[in-house]
């Protein structure tokens, strides 16, 4: 599968990526900014996420949240945004004929947001309640605390949403300053995927909307990623299950061995026929969910397993997961590797059937790595992975001395 992409820059350095799709009537307009919580100081913690909320509060042309919502609802579109540790994204998916309006709304939000202090005062409390919500969800709590442990000592080892104290201390002036530091030039990428239409005309429309953004190149992250020490932590919480993460430091998104690691993750816990699903759920009945994950940032990463298990059998589940992780490199079979390849290759077309999935596939890679990777290239990389490469990456990374774990649930005697 190959898409006929167009990748260019506006006069001020803002990057534009057009990805036409055949046979669709929708279009996703996504603006990505290469900044997230890893660019924040401890005092700023959560400001990227606060800003993401606040640009929806009104602009010069759309002076209230209702004005923005009515403009989007008036064309039957879908709008949302997201903040991660390394990027922030804003998107509208609409019928193709409404692309000019989608661009207008998005550009207004990211160039002339009002950021009123009164609205911020209210929204800070909304975000505090969001923090409380995650605290009340042990599955989410386990994931956040595991990443804090894995990346301890670096800005990656802080929660994206920040703390109640830092959120409440954020002012409109802080937001404007932060926006001025990161929302400009090559640090911004506009992705238009779907029924694009005349490419030249679309680029001219984007230039008209975002040509006033401050000029600049692609910014580097302000601090390097890093890992904390290997340890086990237990966060006491009254729950009906114990939720845990167990994992090891791994590799970054730039490492050519990432496809071998991804295949290892699938064999370990990537589906309903994976080793862990079979061992933990089917054979022992210890958990409803058990899954292996990988995280790959600009310069760090991890391989981990997460599960929610019976309180009385937490120790057994932790033991089984550790054993399965440690023996993976030495016992993986050709049949398992072949099945894992087919699993990944089968899921890829599903993720690229809609304009949103295509915008994400190309956009994330272009934003951070400044390169276009076609699905066919990924397919070839996956197919070319050898058993030796899979075993080597597992044996290098998965060592007992490197294992970190976090448990959220009642403390057992």
Image: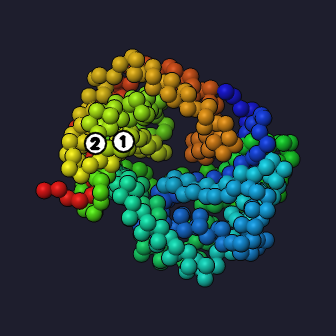
Binning the other alpha carbons within 10 Å of mark 2 as few (below 14), some (14 to 19) or many (20 upward) gives many
In front of the other: label 1 or label 2? 2
Looking at the rendering, in which quadrant would you find the C terminus? bottom left
Seen in the image, is 262 located left or right of residue 61?
left
Q: Is 248 in front, or is 318?
A: 318
Q: Can residue 357 be seen in this view?
A: yes
How many marks the image carries: the answer is: 2
Q: Badge 1 local density, few (<14 within 10 Å), some, or many (20+)?
A: many
How far separated are the C-alphas under marks 1 and 2? 9 Å
Where does the image place residue 9, in percent across and percent down from the top left?
73, 47
Which element carries disc 2, helix, strand or loop? loop
| Percent position of residue 155, x then y | 41, 58
Query: For the point 67% across and 54% down, which residue is it?
Result: 91
Q: Is residue 329 above or below residue 353?
A: above
Residue at which label 2 appears:
286
Contact flag, marks 1 and 2 (Cβ < 8 Å): yes
Q: Is residue 366 visible?
A: no
Tell me which residue sits at (23%, 59%) in the image. Answer: 410
Q: Which residue is drawn at 47% across and 57% down?
A: 38
Q: Which mark is residue 290?
A: 1
In the picture provided, is 189 more to the left or to the right than 174? right
Residue 18 x %, y %: 74, 42
What percent of the width, then of the height, locates residue 396? 31, 30
State the residue lying farthest toward the top: 334
């Amino acid at each position: 599968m190959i898409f006929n992409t167009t990748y260019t820059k506006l006069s001020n350095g803002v990057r534009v990526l057009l990805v036409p799709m055949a046979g669709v009537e929708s279009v996703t307009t996504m603006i990505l900014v290469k900044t997230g919580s890893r660019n924040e100081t401890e005092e700023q913690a959560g400001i990227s996420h606060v800003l993401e909320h606040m640009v929806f509060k009104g602009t010069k042309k759309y002076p209230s949240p209702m004005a923005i919502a009515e403009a989007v609802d008036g064309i039957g579109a879908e709008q949302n945004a997201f903040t991660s540790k390394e990027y922030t994204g804003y998107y509208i998916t609409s019928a193709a004929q409404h692309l000019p309006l989608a661009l207008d709304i998005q550009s207004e939000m990211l160039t002339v947001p009002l950021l009123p202090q009164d609205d911020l005062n209210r929204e800070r409390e909304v975000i505090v309640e969001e923090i409380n919500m995650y605290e009340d969800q042990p599955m989410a709590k386990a994931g956040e605390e595991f990443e804090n442990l894995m990346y301890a000592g670096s800005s990656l080892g802080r929660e994206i949403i920040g703390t109640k104290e830092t959120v409440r201390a954020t002012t409109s002036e802080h937001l404007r300053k932060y926006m001025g530091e990161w929302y400009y030039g090559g640090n911004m990428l506009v992705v238009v995927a779907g029924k694009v239409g005349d490419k030249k005309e679309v680029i001219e429309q984007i230039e008209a909307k975002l040509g006033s953004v401050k000029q600049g190149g692609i910014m580097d992250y302000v601090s390097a990623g890093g890992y904390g020490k290997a340890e086990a932590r237990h966060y006491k919480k009254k729950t009906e299950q114990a939720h845990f993460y167990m994992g090891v430091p791994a590799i970054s998104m730039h490492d050519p061995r990432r496809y071998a690691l991804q295949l290892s993750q699938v064999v370990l816990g990537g589906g309903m026929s994976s080793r862990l699903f079979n061992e933990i759920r089917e054979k022992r009945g210890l958990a409803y969910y058990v899954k292996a994950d990988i995280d790959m940032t600009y310069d760090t990463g991890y391989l981990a397993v997460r599960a929610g298990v019976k309180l009385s059998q937490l120790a057994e589940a932790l033991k089984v997961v550790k054993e399965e992780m440690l023996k993976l490199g030495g016992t993986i079979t050709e049949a398992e590797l072949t099945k894992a390849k087919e699993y990944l290759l089968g899921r890829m077309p599903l993720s690229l059937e809609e304009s949103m999935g295509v915008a994400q596939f190309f956009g994330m890679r272009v934003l951070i790595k400044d390169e276009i990777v076609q699905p066919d290239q990924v397919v070839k990389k996956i197919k070319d992975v050898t058993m030796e490469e899979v075993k080597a990456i597992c044996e290098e990374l998965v060592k007992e001395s490197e294992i970190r774990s976090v448990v959220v649930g009642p403390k057992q005697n």
